[in-house]
Image (spheres, rainbow, N blue to C red):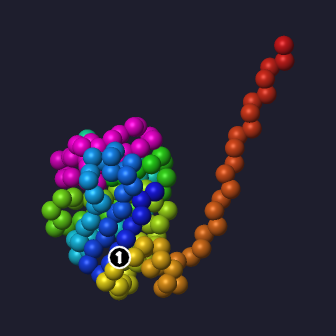
Amino acid sequence: MVTLLLDSTRLEVVLSGAERAMAFRKGNVAVERWTIAKVQLTDDTWTWLRGVPSPGTHLRGIVAIGTWKSAGGDDFAVIRRHRPGVVIDLEGDPEYQRLILTTRHGLALVQALRVEVAEEPTDVVDIAAETGAMPVVPRKPRTRKAPAPSPAV
């Protein structure tokens, strides 16, 4: 899962070493805050992926990380499994038209973008928690399927 840092001028998507290697990037992805046109929460980020990885890593249904080129423009994606995430539409950014990210903190990002923040980069979860607007959602316990009984011989 990516870490999202926000300050008064820009949003930074902090990538781990493995994510940088799979995205073929030397550093993090940073966009100016004024270029963010729309932020959408989604239950499955795979439905938003368009184009072909160039450069990037794609293992169908498992991981999609890197730049995706399409007729609509270049997108940057960090998608893991079929998990919820956020789609950030950009206008005027020189590198990307859209960011597609798998993260549990999409709601915190939306809330953090609505408030004025400090000059130094801060995690969006911390910003949303300070405003008191971030609801605490209990996690659902994972249920596992019971193994099928073996046939009697």
Give the percent coordinates (x, y) of residue 133: 51, 82
Q: Would you place residue 134 above or below residue 87 in this image?
A: below
Instruction: Identify residue for label 1.
Output: 121
Circle 1 SS class = loop
Give the percent coordinates (x, y) of residue 121: 35, 76
Say which of 134 and 117 sits in front. Answer: 117
Query: Which contiguous range is marked in magenta?
Result: 53-76
Q: Would you place residue 22 above or below residue 27 in this image?
A: above
The answer, for residue 49, to whether it is visible in the render is no
Give the percent coordinates (x, y) of residue 88: 32, 64
Q: Is residue 29 left or right of residue 71?
A: right
Look at label 1 and name its amino acid: Pro
Q: Residues within 10 Å of mark 1 (few under 14, many from 20)?
A: some
**Can you tell which quarter of the image residue 123 is in?**
bottom left
Instruction: Give the overall secondary structure of the magenta segment.
Output: strand
Residue for point 26% across, 78% down = 9
The answer, for residue 63, to whether it is visible in the render is yes
Residue for point 27% across, 46% down = 24
Q: Identify the image quadrant of the C terminus.
A: top right
Q: In this view, which residue lies farthest toward the top?
A: 153
Q: Would you place residue 108 above or below residue 17 in this image?
A: below
Instruction: Verify whether residue 61 appears in magenta.
Output: yes
Say which of 83 and 7 sits in front. Answer: 7
Q: Is residue 42 left or right of residue 146?
A: left
Instruction: Verify whether residue 26 appears in magenta.
Output: no
Q: Is residue 75 left or right of residue 59?
A: left
